[in-house]
Image (cartoon, helix red, strand yellow):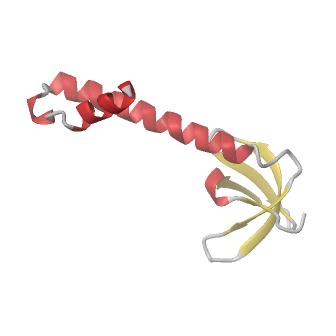
């Protein structure tokens, strides 16, 4: 219940009354929170895979690329395709291979 009051209080805050310093601090806190949420999403997505997992993604041309997971990066997954190409794919764009 306390959380609801905090959310209502935050949403009703008149940012027009905040000083430049307070706005900058608020901005830093918002950006930090968004980065944390992004990290949680990437971690959840990475849990769908292990190294060597077959996967797929759609490249910039709209072609489905079949691949194997070779490395986990901070925000992306490195994969290798059958023709030897190596791609760094944003975690949200890679999918487990449906038939694997």
Q: Quadrant of residue 1?
A: top left
Residue under the point 58% across and 37% down: 39
Residue 74 x/y as whole percent: 64, 38
- Residue at x 66%, y 55% (from the top left corner): 89
Q: Nearer the viewer, residue 79 or 34?
A: 34
Q: At x 73% / y 74%, what residue is drawn?
A: 64
Is 86 placed above or below 77 here? below
Query: In the orientation shown, which residue stands out farthest toward the left?
Result: 17
| Residue 17 shown left or right of residue 7 in the figure | left
Q: Position of residue 69 (x, y in %)?
A: 81, 52
Q: Measuring 62% from the left and 55% from the top, which residue is drawn there?
A: 92
**83 sits to left or right of 14:** right
- The quadrant in which the C terminus is found is bottom right
Q: Position of residue 29 (x, y in %)?
A: 36, 28
User: Up-down: is 66 above or below 21?
Assistant: below
On the picture, is 53 further left or further right than 74? right
Observer-nearest of 83 and 76: 76
């Amino acid at each position: 219940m306390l959380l609801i009051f905090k959310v209502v209080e935050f949403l009703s805050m008149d940012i027009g009354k905040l000083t430049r310093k307070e706005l900058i601090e608020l901005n830093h806190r918002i950006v930090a929170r968004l980065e944390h949420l992004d990290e949680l999403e990437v971690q959840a997505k990475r849990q769908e895979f292990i190294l060597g997992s077959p996967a797929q993604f759609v490249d910039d041309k709209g072609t489905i690329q079949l691949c194997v997971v070779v490395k986990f990066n901070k925000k992306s997954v490195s994969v290798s395709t059958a023709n030897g190409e190596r791609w760094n794919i944003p975690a949200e764009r890679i999918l487990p291979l449906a038939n694997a």
